[in-house]
Amino acid sequence: VKSYNITLLPGDGIGPEVISVAKNVLNLAGSLEGIEFKFKEMPMGGAALDLTGVPLPEETLTTAKQSDAVLLGAIGGYKWDKNEKHLKPETGLLQLREGLKVFANLRPASVLPQLVDASTLKKEVAEGVDLMVVRELTGGIYFGKPRGFGTNENGEEIGFNTDVYAAYEIDRIARIAFETARKRSGKLCSVDKANVLEASMFWRERVIAIASEYPDVELTHMYVDNAAMQLVRNPKQFDTIVTNNIFGDILSDEASMITGSIGMLPSASLGESGPGLFEPIHGSAPDIAGQDKANPLATILSAAMLLKYGLGEVQAAERIELAVLDTLNRGFRTGDIYSVGNKLVGCKEMGEQVLKSV
Amino acid sequence: VKSYNITLLPGDGIGPEVISVAKNVLNLAGSLEGIEFKFKEMPMGGAALDLTGVPLPEETLTTAKQSDAVLLGAIGGYKWDKNEKHLKPETGLLQLREGLKVFANLRPASVLPQLVDASTLKKEVAEGVDLMVVRELTGGIYFGKPRGFGTNENGEEIGFNTDVYAAYEIDRIARIAFETARKRSGKLCSVDKANVLEASMFWRERVIAIASEYPDVELTHMYVDNAAMQLVRNPKQFDTIVTNNIFGDILSDEASMITGSIGMLPSASLGESGPGLFEPIHGSAPDIAGQDKANPLATILSAAMLLKYGLGEVQAAERIELAVLDTLNRGFRTGDIYSVGNKLVGCKEMGEQVLKSV
Ligand SMILES: CC(C)[C@H](C(=O)O)[C@@H](O)C(=O)O
Ligand SMILES: CC(C)[C@H](C(=O)O)[C@@H](O)C(=O)O
């Protein structure tokens, strides 16, 4: 039997519930494919703050780095919202991304035929949407320096950040995006604000330079404000989108909501080498935490991405993906994706049903 | 008779067509209210580049500054897309905003009952949407320094921008937003990314400080990624939104597309004193330029905002707003908002019909 070390970071809110379900699914799918997992659960986010005083304890980062892949639930909650920056759960997540050097964040957003009604968009606009946002994750305004508070030349108080990209940072995310587009429909749209920002002009210049390595991929460019519109007007025009950290944050969330089922959407964050980080794109949903109401499918599908992109275990990954589809076909729905005629279940029961289909 | 000097900046693409129609509407509405306009047409954007070599000639800016209000059509086009930064039509627009010191950009997005089908959102989600985005327009990453291209400490090429806000810049846009919310439903949502960016933390701190002057307005805060989602999920939850320059660029375009009729949406940009700048939020649409297909209603409604916010001529403004509604009620539609059962007209004919209703 092959064996992998997986770091589990349940985090806050509904995180522990969905991670516990996804762990069972990983175990079963693995055992059916001759794969064994050794799980190590570590504190992170608000949970880590309460336990250790910091949002990403050193031991958590070390364990994550030494493992083969990392599966994260969700972090954050009202309780820590007013914390100073270095004591915010979100800061722990940024430190984790930086520490694991996972610069490429893949966020698929597709509308399953079974769930097309969940979208707030008209059926003819939503059906068939199947896009992938490739977001740069360890650069740009999230990490750029100088940053902070101070005074300007007139002595006025200011708050400031730096949006900065080096050529190598753009080149490597562009390559991931071109590779991704090549495996999909061969269409890549790079989103920037090159009519105003130098950081974006440089982004566009480098993406065009890298494009020469991928003559089979059709590259287009779009301004971020237009992209935010086009996602609402006609999301089907997009296949693969590549963009910087902050625009990717905004557009991937918008795209996910267009599917109407953000409780279904996984993500993968990958580096050059070392373990990848896999997490549902939804948040910690503190208002329904501990009530067995969460939809575990996004985390289960993140586990499938972990198998496929993190470990190269494509068969086990597809086993899970098919099991999720089969469970939906059998009519099981958590509250967030429920529609009349289906069977309303909680988080645990949804997990049991997926296990039956694995 | 009262008399006002209006600078007209037709600009590029469909700009001249929609400005010419809006001018006629202004003239008629004015004369019925005892107001006379003296128009001065000046080059701007790509048109100015072709004529004078710069996107905002000094004479255009001077004329604009000396007038009582400025009405702009649209700028930009493929022809100038590859120009260097200082020779882009967009740079002229940014110089105009900076030159007129119009820091407050008001962008209403509402779904008219007559046009609810134009939205890609389901009817029950779109109908009744009526929100106002108050965007900071002369600060933040659009204007922050340092900016440019260079090399980092490792000798790698970089492109960079600075997102920076001073207290006074946030305070004055916050006051405009609170005033706006007070006149509407009394609900203000401030959008930022205060879980990651210092510029946003400072933004939130100042907005909260100014809130004490407006105890009757209910203030909430939302992260920009969540706002991009919530606009799709349930746009009716919003009344007035206030946000920075770049987030406002993205969210106001997204909001406008949610109405499905961006050919209908006006905007106003205001400073502490001096003339305001009024423009439709749509672009120059080079692909339909000169074909008499453009929807002039956004520019006509921008003229109404000019009367109301720029000149305080509320009655003339309402005359125009009612005329637009009446024209829609009589079934006239340009191509972008056409639906079966209505009368398809071009730009000029739409203008004639509005004149009949003024
Ligand atoms: C929690 C927050 C720091 C994070 C981000 O902005 O990257 C989240 O919104 C995301 O998209 O994963
Ligand atoms: C043309 C461009 C510079 C401009 C902006 O980004 O402000 C436009 O998108 C707008 O929103 O008015």
Image (cartoon, coloured by chain):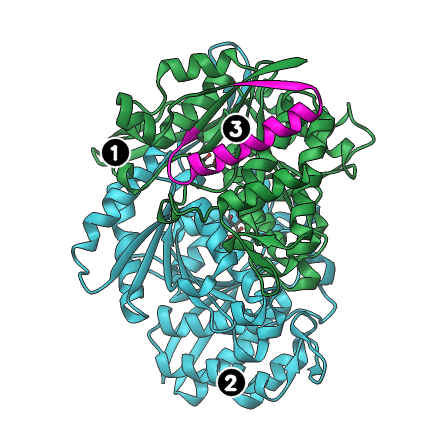
Chain colours: A cyan, B green
| Outermost right residue | B216
Does the magenta segment cover residue A229?
A: no
Res B239 quadrant in image: top right
The N terminus of chain B is located in which quarter? top right
Q: Is residue B150 above or below residue A63?
A: above
Q: Chain of mark 3?
A: B
Q: Is residue B309 above or below residue A103?
A: above
Foreground residue, B105 or A264? B105
| Secondary structure character of the magenta stretch overall | helix
Judge: label 2 CB < 8 Å from ligand 1.
no
Q: Which mark is on residue B83?
A: 1
**Percent position of residue B351, x then y:** 55, 41
Identify residue for label 3: B137
Q: Bounds of the magenta span?
A: B10-38
Residue type pointed to by label 3: Leu
Judge: label 3 CB < 8 Å from ligand 2.
yes
**Percent position of residue B33, x then y:** 71, 23
Horizontal side of A241 relative to A341 (left or right) equals left
Q: Chain of mark 2?
A: A
Residue at horizontal 47 percent and vertical 81 percent from the top: A320
Residue type pointed to by label 1: Asn
